[in-house]
Amino acid sequence: MIDGLKITISGEELRTLLGDGVRRHEKKASRWTRETMRTEEDETEDAPLLPQHMCENEAERHTWRATVLAFIRDHVDAGETYRLSVAELDEGELLPEKPGWLVQDEYEERTRVGFNLDRLVKSVRGLENAATLRNSAEPDRNDFGDFPETVIEETDDFRTTRIDVEGGPEIIKIERK
């Protein structure tokens, strides 16, 4: 019985697939290296110059990845049979490449989550600042000190006020009359 999803692959096929990955990364590294050598004369509307550091980093990343895959390939025994998990297949880049739209969707999802976490952290910090201001106010006061307040809505039962805390979060105060 096999525990989990395992793929059986011959050592010879594994070496071939790893070699394909090495060549793929070497080709990408060469492209990024060529990109670092472009000048303003080479720039077009369809092919703008990219930041030098970005091109250098990408070339280095692909060179490193080619080296890693070559190391693994060189240590695979072509005469053996290997059982690989999905994680191992993914790490060895042995699965088919994802379509571009899927890569873009995953990137946007990761950055959207990161962006929203960043906004959340800023909001919490702003609330901490507001709470500090509130706690430092006189104990019997029911406002935020000298910050300007604007009445948004007033009914027979409630009064809704916006408090302008400079550099902090938007604060809405709802008071029962």
Image: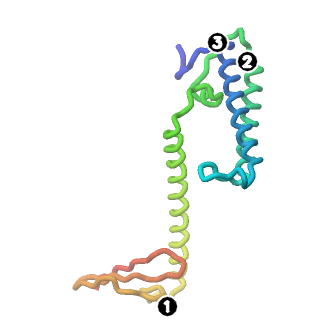
Q: Residue at x 61, y 25 (%)?
A: 94
| Quarter assignment of residue 90 | top right
**x, y percent for residue 83:** 61, 17
- Farthest residue to the front: give it: 41
Q: Which amino acid does label 2 sit on?
A: Val
Q: Which amino acid does label 3 sit on?
A: Ser
Instruction: Provide the residue designation for mark 3.
Output: 10
**x, y percent for residue 128:** 54, 73
Inter-mark Cα distance, 1 to 3:
75 Å
Dot 3, how many residues are within 10 Å of its Cα: few (below 14), some (14-19), or many (20+)? some
Q: Going from the N terminus, do you reach mark 2 or mark 3 first? A: 3
**Left or right of 146 on screen, residue 67:** right
Inter-mark Cα distance, 1 to 2:
72 Å
Q: Going from the N terminus, do you reach mark 1 or mark 2 first? A: 2
**Left or right of 144 on screen, residue 41:** right
Q: Residue at x 49, y 39 (%)?
A: 102
Mark whose residue sits in front, 1 or 2: 2
Instruction: Provide the residue designation for mark 1.
Output: 146
Inter-mark Cα distance, 2 to 3:
10 Å
In the displayed structure, would residue 100 be above or below residue 24?
A: below
**x, y percent for residue 151:** 35, 86
Instruction: Provide the residue designation for mark 2.
Output: 76
Q: Which amino acid does label 1 sit on?
A: Asp
Secondary element under disc 1, as helix, strand or loop, is loop
